[in-house]
Image (tube, rainbow, N blue to C red):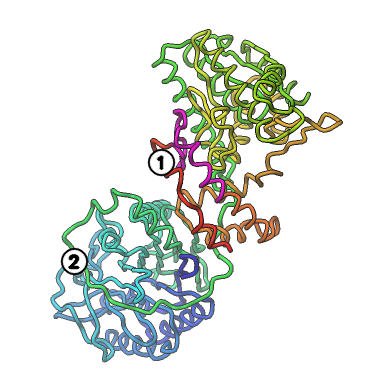
Amino acid sequence: MNHGFVRAAAAVPQLKVAECEYNSDNIIHLINKAENQGIQFVVFPELSITAYTCGDLFHQQALLKEAEKQLERILESTRKTEIVALIGLPVSVDNQLFNCAVAIQKGTILGVVPKTYIPGYSEFYEERWFASANRAVSQEIRLCGQLCPFGADVIFEAKDGSICFGVEICEDLWVPIPPSAYQSLAGAVLLFNLSASNDIIGKYEYRRDMLRQQSAKCIAGYVYASAGICESTTDVVFGGHSLIAEYGSILKETERFTQEEQLIFCEIDIEKLKNDRMKNTSFMEGVHNKKFRKVGFDLKNVKIEKLERAYDPHPFVPSNPQTRDSRCREIFAIQTAGLAKRMRHTGMKYGVIGISGGLDSTLALLVMEKTFDILGIPRENIIAVTMPGFGTTDITYTNAIQLMKSIGATIREVDIKPACLQHFKDIGHDADIHDVTYENVQARERTQVLMDVANKIGGLVIGTGDLSELALGWCTYNGDHMSMYAVNCAIPKTLVKFLVQWVADNIVEADTKDVLYRILDTPISPELLPPSKDGEIKQKTEDIIGPYELHDFFLYHMVRYGAAPEKILFLAKQVFHGEYEEETIKKWLKVFIRRFFGQQFKRSCLPDGPKVGTISLSPRGDWRMPSDAESRSWLKQLE
């Protein structure tokens, strides 16, 4: 597979009711079209050779014989194609008629899966014509002169073991425990549904949510093809609503009620799905006594160079403004609830925080402000300490002072330069040498001040560092690395600024909002090196360690889905095309890997703090990694 991806499609062909030859012509056309587009799997609607709405004509031998004859023609016409196609037709066996999905490849029938749940309510009369798969006797049938596996216990696995797929038909999905649930527990990571689901008011939304949820519960890709408007409209109308979903997300969807044929396709990330199943220790607790027969097939070899599916370059930040607003509201509530519980538990009435005029400390201060309001603690009990050092600029100092004033915190100013100079003298360090010692002395001095102030008044030191800094180890060990409760520890840098902006727009008073917007426009910097001659920030974090938007993208795919470096590089090239050259992405990915491995020791002893999203690097929660693990295998993939 290509970085773990396979390409699957849902097809809605033109058809005529009971005109099998015409329908087969269109099926053949769409199979060839899909083959030429590098698609590896294509699924057609339920009973696609005959049409779903044939009614009592299903009891006519002329229709049944013609359907099998046309299936044979489809097999012959697609003998040179490597795509796996799933086609619907009625099959007579064991003195009964079954509504079946036939899986074919290279002119061969791989297997036949009959429908299990046969509706006989409201507008559906299938029980009049079709038997349930539960009533089948034979496990093999002869169809189009081929002996092939038959039954609802048939699933399909690539001969190289890379992928397994299962098949269900329409109503099978609408029951409390669909066959696809059992198939996924048996190893099927890709699920197909041949459907004929008519459209009535409200059904579209329900069906869409049901498909999305089933793909999520099964941790699977789900490809659903439904009958279109060419079906009989004697009593109902079919809209051709077809979808491709993956683990709770809709990747592609057809337009309903269109007069044209449709073929939608997308890549399914099989590797990601397998990784999540492996991590989810509850997934296989649903193991049952159902036994499945696995039928082998050859996975078509295609080279996927450009993805059809969209990947968000900022996976921690929802692109939809309404979703982003809701997400920020929820995250801010989690932060304040976490800090409120810690304040109540300790019985402390004071909080101590260092304010630099940067984004992280600003967000943490806003969380404190809201929390103290919730608890009914006066805001002056927030002891906000600004500690100018060698790199502090007028702009950040002014922002810090105005922010603290605007929320009504008690302001303390401690100039750390004299203490740092004394410390340089004590340890024999030349203050003109601006190395790591020069920088870290300042960070540790600030932490010491905060801790001692907290001890003096009986308060909590609130940490300000974020998730991205923890991933990169961009913090001074036992300096800004340390606090008594870290409210930002699970929030990535790319999300911090949206949270600050959300608070500015929704929570605070006008004067605070003005300050927040100035802070949002300030470059990210630790301000540990002296400013430029004109007083501007000289030390810009992203110039040193790389763009945070890249690092957050790397972090998300590596930690959330266990993606290998070569896959992360492939994805990053797709989403950042035109913004970063491949060599630039590769350069910063190497930096990320080296720092992520090399700085684990800082994460092994983190202060408490709330998890807010799917990723946390807490050593007590989501991420338990040895501090002396080697990164060589990860880096080797990029060489």
Depth check: 160 or 328 in front? 160
Depth check: 86 or 266 in front? 266
* Secondary structure state at the residue bearing disc 2: loop
Residue 408: x and y, percent? 63, 12
In this orientation, does residue 365 appear?
yes
Name the quadrant containing residue 362.
top right
Spot the residue most to the front. 428
Please indicate whether residue 145 sits to the left or right of residue 612 in the image.
left
Label drawn at residue 291: 2
Q: In percent of the image, x 34 and y 68: which residue is there?
A: 165
Name the amino acid, label 2: Lys
Spot the residue most to the right. 534
Q: In percent of the image, x 25 and y 69: which residue is there?
A: 115
Q: Is residue 611 magenta?
A: yes
Q: Residues within 10 Å of mark 2 (few under 14, many from 20)?
A: few
Residue 616: x and y, percent? 46, 39
Name the amino acid, label 1: Asp
Q: Earlier in the sequence, mark 2 or mark 1?
A: 2
Q: Residues within 10 Å of mark 1 (few under 14, many from 20)?
A: some
What segment carries the magenta color?
593-618
Name the quadrant containing residue 231.
bottom left
Name the quadrant containing residue 307.
bottom right
Q: Quadrant of the C terminus?
A: bottom right
Q: CA distance from mark 2 to mark 1?
A: 34 Å
* Secondary structure state at the residue bearing disc 1: loop
Q: Classify 10 as above or below 395.
A: below
Q: Is residue 55 magenta?
A: no
Most prominent secondary structure in the magenta stretch? loop
Label drawn at residue 622: 1
Residue 572: x and y, percent? 59, 57
